[in-house]
Image: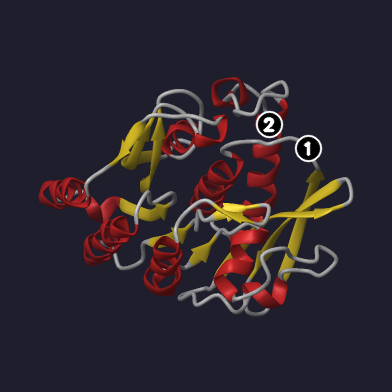
Amino acid sequence: MAILSISSRVVYGYVGNSAMVPALQHLGLTVWPVDTVVFSNHPGHGQFRGEVRDPAALTALLKGLADLGVLATCRAVISGYLGSADNAAVVESALDLVRAANPGAVYCCDPVIGDNGRNYVGADVVAAIRDRLLPRADLATPNRHELAVLTGGPATIDTDATPVAAARRLPLSGPRLALVTGDRHGDEVWTWLIDPERAESCRQPWRDRPISGAGDLLAALFVGYWLRLGAPGAALPAAVTRVSEMIDASGGSRDIDVVAGLGTQS
């Protein structure tokens, strides 16, 4: 059972594929990472070096997988940080190739746009995610800020209101699932699983500090548990609890220590 993960890579720390790959492998899943960018570290540290990968080179990697004849074993595609609007075409190519081999493959779009009222990608990336990727997604995993951006809401959301109505406006396909993260209520943070008919939340303590990679891990682990357990409702508490354990195991660091976190029990 394989997952194709199209996201960022860092040398130091655990975000994007650097976090998602070991976490999914720990669940016993095979992961094929395609790195949209390679950076020295998360840009949240204030400085970084690296590059955005060329879309043609990434698409060539996907075609290489197709040539091997292995894409029929791919059960899910996850896309995260694109690095450029041009890399949306890489995700589209991946979906075309994977679904030609396995029409039942799930697509999870993690719309990495920004947080806390601030975008850290350009308007062209937002448009590519909203207009090209979300309409092909079975599952989207926005935080509250990203949900507002994608549905035309205010940059700062009134956290006394639930995100249910906004999540149901996302232009999704298939089961139309939304995993909405970062919904703070006092000293708790709520993670919502929303479909056209139901909505449920899972609550954890709020950590009052920047944490890099938590959204990447939650999206990946939700997909992983969904595949392993067979039901999105069962995947929600499993994924939320696992990420919370990994944050606690990181000892207050901005960067989640995935290696230490994988040593905890869930």
Residue 175 in view here: yes
Residues packed near mark 1 inside 10 Å, few (<14), some (14 to 19) or many (20 plus): some
Disc 2 marks a residue whose amino acid type is Ile
Label 1: which secondary element: loop
Residue hosting label 1: 207
The residue shown at (50%, 58%) is 111
> Which marked residue is nearer to the observer: mark 1 or mark 2?
1
Residue hosting label 2: 247
Question: What is the quadrant of residue 32 in the picture?
Answer: top left
- Total marks drawn? 2
Quadrant of the image containing the C terminus: top right
Report the Cα–Cα distance between label 1 and label 2. 9 Å
Residue 141 numbered tag: none
**Is 238 in front, or is 220?**
220
- Answer with left or right where residue 96 lies relative to residue 63: right
The residue shown at (34%, 40%) is 37
Question: What is the quadrant of residue 232 in the picture?
Answer: bottom right
Q: Residue furthest right?
A: 186
* Depicted 259 relative to depicted 76: above or below: above
Disc 1 marks a residue whose amino acid type is Arg
The colour scheme of the drawn protein is secondary structure
The residue shown at (89%, 51%) is 186
Q: Position of residue 185 (x, y in %)?
A: 85, 55
The residue shown at (67%, 60%) is 144
Residues packed near mark 2 inside 10 Å, few (<14), some (14 to 19) or many (20 plus): many
CB of mark 1 within 8 Å of CB of mark 2? yes
Label 2: which secondary element: helix
